[in-house]
Image (tube, grey):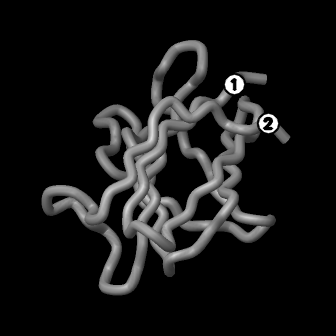
Amino acid sequence: MKTALVIWASFLGACGIGDCVAGPGEAEVSLYVTDAATGAAVRQPTFDTEGVPLTGICQDPSNQDPLVCTSWVIVGPPSRLAITVTAVGYHPATVKVDTTATMAIHLAVELEAL
């Protein structure tokens, strides 16, 4: 399994300016999933941690295809996770996150085509 190339990570004490998806006591991880060669958003990525599926909430869907999103948000209790990102036609990638010290993390994840 390949580890994702993380271009940037912004660790915030809050979700941002009015854009929180997480409720009280929850943390959120925003993943910007793109094609490593083109930089285009990847269509319908899936997420799991240790084989357990995670629900990604689409943020800013494309007008042409609602399964192509600028970012995907995963909400849950504060924790340390290894999140595996997969999509049809791409090698999986894994990112490690720790939301025990911050309630929101934003990561860029590049997937390499098969």
Name the residue: 21% across, 60% down.
Answer: 19
Name the residue: 29% across, 36% down.
Answer: 63
Q: Residue furthest right?
A: 1
Q: Is residue 34 left or right of residue 63?
A: right
Q: Nearer the viewer, mark 2 or mark 1?
A: 2
Q: Nearer the viewer, residue 81 or 21?
A: 81
The label shown at residue 112 is: 1
Badge 1 local density, few (<14 within 10 Å), some, or many (20+)? some
Q: Amino acid at mark 1?
A: Glu
What x and y, as percent, mark residue 82?
Answer: 69, 58
Is the residue 22 above or below the residue 97 in the image? below
Q: Is residue 86 left or right of residue 18?
A: right
The residue at which mark 2 appears reads as 2
Q: Quadrant of the C terminus?
A: top right
Secondary structure of the residue carrying numbered label 2:
strand
Q: Amino acid at mark 2?
A: Lys
